[in-house]
Each structure stands twice: as structure tokens, then as C-alpha cells.
Image: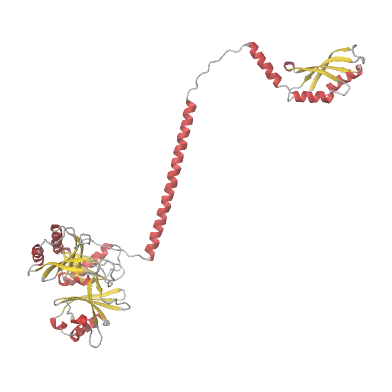
Amino acid sequence: MSRFKPKHLRLLISPTAVTLFMDTWGQSSTSKLIASTDLPRGDLVQALESALAALPSENVPPRAALSVVLADPLVRLFLVTPPSNLTRFEDLRCAAAIRFERLYEAHASDWHVAAAWTSEAPFPACAVPLAVLGVLARFAAARKLRFGKIVPAAFEHPRADHPLQGQETSWLLSRCGTHVTMAVRTRDRLQAIRALTWPEEAWRSWDSLHDGLSREAMRLDCALPKFLIGTGDIPAEFFANPHPNGAIHLLKVHPAKPVGIRRYPWPALDLRPGPKIRAGWTPASLVVCGCALAITAYAAAQSVLLATRISELQKEVAHAGMRLAARERPVDSVPVTAVKGEQVAAVNSAVRQLNLPWQRILQAIEAATPKEIALLALEPEAKRTALKGTAEAPTADGMLSYITQLKTQRTFHNVLLTRHEVNDQDPMKPFRFQFEVYWREAGE
């Protein structure tokens, strides 16, 4: 076998033999017999342990997946109705244990109970002795194998030669010697599981088989379906030839491939220790998951925004600390150079000159000066808030009138005529005079 193909072992355990197959999945599904040995009579646990130890290990690849199929007589199959006051998964386990003890009069603590757990409808359950599981676990550990699953033969996830679509009622019929397991499924609910003992005469002809099935249909108060799924050691002629009048067709089953094969929809039963719950998707669960995802996404976005804001605040705090430290840092003293008095006086004089209200003074003088008066010079004295002026007038009356006109200006609070004379050198003999005006400070 190619080293790249999956290695899968299938161990079939019947009441009389233990058989090990190598299954390969490719273009065609094949099973290769590796070893087989008889199962001694007597205590099942001791007989199984000695039979497994007798299997040769030459052709058993290590670390291969191991599936164990237990014949129906070696397990206990039954149907469990969920309690009406169900509140937790442990209630389903207790209901299964109580049902098992009532049916088989055995203590549930010595058995491992597995089921297709559901709280919505009756579900199948299966019990296997804990001692048997212990023997299988020791065998797998000794041969370095890993468990794929442990299933009863009746629920080995078979696929049928017919899809059985559109059938309201379907039956599963499993035979192991005189032991017969019958499961009845109506629509999407499992209605009954029955463990029967049929003699060899029941399998001699279609009529005897039809009679037995009809009796069970009457006990279950349901109609006998046209198609049945058959597995186990049912005689091959029942699969090859239907009932003479076409009332019943028995369909053969094969072990299902892991992937890609349509399987008949019977519940899954895995007898490996530990509860295995597979929740199905419902509209309510989808809505809950969607809301949970939306809340998670919103919380993640808010967390990112909060982290960004915290980072910004940390930067602002760091900058504020730097500014505060800079303020508290001592300032280096600057040596003070003594300023001389003359420099102070010169600076003050320059400041006063710069602060002269020149525009206001000139506007007042321009408004008071008529055309016949000629202004020859203006010299301000900022310290005294005074302005000395020199002007010429054609007559003495014009000179006096000009002085009077200056006094009427609100900018000046005092006007003085300090000197006057006649300019004899000029043919017009004008009066040249000097005056002083004192301006008002701003706000006076």
C-alpha cells in the first residue's frame, strides 16, 4: 500500500471471531484481510484479550487509525425518551442510565453508555462494558494505534444501494446469528429499537421473513415499508431477489467512505469514552452567533479607539510635563551693565520725540494759518510740550489775528507771542514774529 494513502484499520468483533481489515479509500474502496482469530467461549473480557493478543503484528502499520465494530449481541441498544423537566446535559445521561437499568437489570456504573444525545426527540443509546473498552484501549496502545471510533454493527453509518428518498417510514434490519436488531424510523424521528431472537427458520424464505416482519409491525403499530436496509449476515438471496409479489425490497449496505458517499441518515453512535455532543445549526443559534460576532467586533473596535485615545493622552501628559519642567528650570542671570546719565537722557529725549503727536499738531496749525501768513520754521520741544514757530505777516493786524486764531484751536491750551519786528530788507516791509504754542496731552 502506498505510504501516502491514509492507513485505516477496521476491527470486527463478533461473538465467535475477531477479524482485522485494512481499508483503503481511493478510486475504489477495498478491504484487505490482515488477520482473523476465533473468540474463545467463556468470559467475554478474558476471551477478547486473548484473541487480540493472538493477532499477528507483522502487517499492522503503527499510528494507523483504528475503527472497532462490535457485533450487536456484544452491546445493548435501546431508545431513550428525554425527560420533560430537562435543564442540563446530565439529565439526559441520568435518563439513559435509568432506562438501561430497567431494560437489562444491570448496574449502569459497570457500562459505558453512548448516545445520539438530543433533547427534542427520543434518541438511540448503546451500552458497552467498561472492561471491554479497557481491553481495546490496551490493544491500541500496545500496537501504537489511534482510535477512530467504536460503533455497534447496526449503526456503522452504512450507505445503501438505494437512496430511499421520499419514504416516510424506513427500517434498519441487522442480523448476527440468531440475534436480530431492528430500528424503525418514521419521518425524522426514531420510533423504536428492538433486540430479537429469530431462529434459522425465519431466514429460509421470503414468506417466513415477511411473516416475522409483519408481526413486529403489528407490535409497533406501524406499516411495513416497501424498502428495508439490511446489514450483517443476512443471506445474499434476499438482496438479489425481492419478495415474489414485490411487497418488500431488502437493500444491502456497505461500509461508508469517510468522505464523498451518501450515507443513510441513521444517528451516529460512537462508543469511545467521553460524551460527544455535536450541536446542529438552527435559525436561533445562527442569530445568537451573529449577535455575538457583532458584539465582539464592536467591542474590538471600541478597544482600538480606547487604546488610541489613551496613547494620545499619554503623549499630551508627557508634553505638559516637559513644559512644566522647562518653566521650573532656573534662568541664567544676565549681567547688568550700568547706563550713564547722558545715555538715559538721550534715550528719553528720543522716546519723547517719537511720541510727539505730530499729526494732531500740524492739523491744528494748518487749520489756523490763513494764506497771507507765511510759516518759516517750526521747532518742537517735547519735554515742555511746546512748539516754537517763526512766521511773517503783511501787517500787525494780521499777526495779532493769527495769534488769536491759534488760541481757538482745542489742540493748544496756551499761545504766546514772544517776539516781533519789521523786516526792512523786504520791500513789502512784512512783520516777522516768533510764537510758542503748548499742546494738550492725549486724554486732557
Q: On screen, 56 above or below 315?
A: below
Can you name the residue that lies furthest to the bottom here?
245
The quarter of the rendered structure image containing the N terminus is: bottom left
Seen from the viewer's position, the closer of residues 218 and 211 is 211
Between residues 315 and 413, which one lies in front from this camera angle? 315
The C terminus: image quadrant: top right
Residue that lies at the very extreme toward the front in this rendered image = 2
Residue 2 percent across, percent down from the top left:
20, 61
In x, y percent, where is residue 276? 25, 62
Q: How many marks?
A: 0
Kindly indicate the quadrant of the structure image that contains residue 255.
Answer: bottom left
Picture colour scheme = secondary structure
At 44% from the left and 45% from the top, the residue drawn is 306
Pick the residue in front: 204 or 286. 204
Side of 425 relative to 69 (left or right): right
Residue 244 lies, with reference to residue 423, above or below; the image says below
Give the quarter of the image for residue 144.
bottom left
Residue 6 lies, in percent from the top left, at 22, 62
Residue 64 location (% of width, % of height):
19, 60
Q: Say whether residue 414 is left or right of residue 165.
A: right
Res. 82 image quadrant:
bottom left
**241 over 135 or under it: above or below:** below
Q: In the depicted view, which residue is nearer to us: 280 or 219?
A: 280
Taking the spot 89% from the left edge, 20% from the top edge, the residue there is 401
**439 with respect to 193 (left or right):** right
